[in-house]
Every structure is written in C-alpha cells, then in structure tokens.
C-alpha cells in the first residue's frame, strides 16, 4: 500500500504520518524504516533533525537519502516494512539545488517506477509526506516558480499512484482518496 500525505508547512502532516505509520506497523507486525531527505546544512536543520529523531523513538531504522531516493526505495529497503519518507518536497528541493539542469519529467517517472512495487508487495507499505505548495501566491522568481510547478506535478503523479491520499491542515487529516481497508483486495468487482 502507498499512502501519500500532503499539507502545508507546520500543518501537522509529519506527526500524522508518523502516527499512521506506527499504527500500521503495529497492526501488520512490520519493521519501521524512516527515510529522511533533509540535508544537515546548518545548525537549525541539525536541531530539527534531532527533534524529529526524539519524536520517532529508537525503534525506527533510519536512512538519510537526500538525493538517491528512487534507488533507495527500489534496492535499499529490507522487507517486511512500513517505510516512511519525509519529505518529498525537500528531496525535490535538493534535486533542484544540486542538479538544476536535469530532466524533471524523467526524475518523476523514475521515482514513480521505484514505488510501483509498493502497490503490489503485501510485505511493504510506503508512506510519503509532501508539502502542498500550490495554495499560496504565485512566486515571483523563476526558480521558485519552477519549484512550485515541479512539486505540484510530483504530488499529482504520486496521488495517482497512491492507494490512499490524506490532506492535513491545522493538525487535522482529511481523506482525499480513501484506498482500501486491510484484508480487502484491489478488485472491486465483488
């Protein structure tokens, strides 16, 4: 199963994702793997990373994957597991910063291919956290507009691929795409 969780900055999306993934791992008796995309560029980011680690607790396996996310999701995850990626928007920002000339359609398609196995492998659940960046004003600078465009297209593509999509605002989750419940198949003909 793939669960995409979107929301604005400080919306509570990471906390909701953590609670959801923890509960899912408990119910299904799966390992918990946290994939962090943040880069430790300054003291504030290091403090933020440390705070998130304390909130998670020590029973999460941690992988820091600021750039090679598709490859990690394809080859680095040990199943059975609930894999929580926080967050895709930072990963996209890292891509724009380090490789601004790359083909972002190709990057998006590569990521989509890497998550396909999570749609069909019952030993793996994938929880993806992303910022909803399209609710504010249109940014002034070209780089900012490119970022908002790419983030929007990435979220749309992943929402299509996801079994379940939640939107979090003010700490409250809303279900945008309900998915299936545990034990129910994807075949809706019955």
Image (spheres, rainbow, N blue to C red):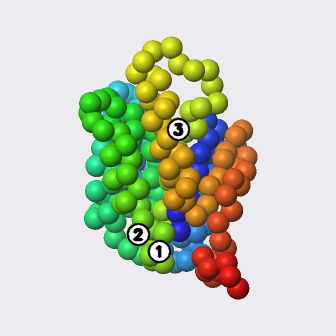
| Residues at marks 1 and 3, CA–CA distance in whole angstroms | 25 Å
Pointer 1: residues within 10 angstroms few (<14), some, or many (20+)?
few
Pointer 2: residues within 10 angstroms few (<14), some, or many (20+)?
some
**In this orientation, does residue 51 appear?**
no
Check disc 3 and report the residue beneath it. 152
- The image position of residue 48, as x and y in percent, is 46, 36
Kindly identify which numbered label has been placed on residue 62.
Answer: none
Check disc 1 and report the residue beneath it. 120
The vertical placement of 87 against 75, above or below, is above
Q: Are marks 2 and 1 in contact (CB under 8 Å)?
A: yes
- Along the horizontal axis of the image, is 124 left or right of 19? left
Check disc 2 and report the residue beneath it. 117
The vertical placement of 96 against 168, above or below, is above
- The kind of secondary structure element at disc 1 is helix
The vertical placement of 92 against 79, above or below, is above
- The image position of residue 16, as x and y in percent, is 62, 52
The residue positioned 64% from the left and 30% from the top of the image is: 135
Which sits in the foreground, 182 or 96?
A: 96
The residue positioned 47% from the left and 44% from the top of the image is: 154
Pointer 3: residues within 10 angstroms few (<14), some, or many (20+)?
some
Q: Residue furthest bottom?
A: 190
Task: Of the two numbered discs 3 and 2 on the same chain, state the one appearing first in sequence.
Answer: 2
- The image position of residue 184, as x and y in percent, is 65, 80
Which sits in the foreground, 59 or 179?
A: 179
Count of marks, rendered view: 3
Which sits in the foreground, 143 or 7?
A: 143
| Residues at marks 2 and 1, CA–CA distance in whole angstroms | 6 Å
- Along the horizontal axis of the image, is 123 left or right of 159? left
């Amino acid at each position: 199963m793939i669960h995409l969780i979107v929301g604005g900055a400080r919306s509570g999306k990471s906390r909701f994702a953590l609670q959801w993934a923890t509960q899912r791992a408990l119910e299904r008796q799966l390992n918990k793997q946290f994939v962090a995309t943040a880069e430790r560029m300054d003291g504030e980011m290091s403090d933020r990373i440390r705070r998130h680690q304390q909130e998670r607790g020590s029973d999460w396996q941690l992988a820091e994957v600021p750039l090679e996310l598709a490859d990690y999701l394809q080859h680095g995850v040990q199943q059975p597991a609930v894999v929580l990626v926080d967050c895709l928007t930072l990963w996209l920002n890292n891509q724009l910063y380090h490789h601004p000339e790359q083909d972002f359609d190709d990057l998006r398609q590569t990521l989509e291919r890497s998550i396909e196995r999570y749609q069909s492998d019952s030993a793996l659940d994938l929880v993806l956290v992303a910022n909803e960046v399209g609710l504010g004003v249109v940014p002034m600078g070209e780089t900012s507009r490119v970022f908002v465009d790419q983030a929007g297209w990435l979220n749309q593509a992943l929402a299509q691929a996801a079994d379940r999509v939640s939107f979090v605002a003010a700490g409250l989750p809303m279900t945008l795409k309900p998915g299936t419940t545990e034990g129910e198949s994807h075949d809706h003909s019955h």
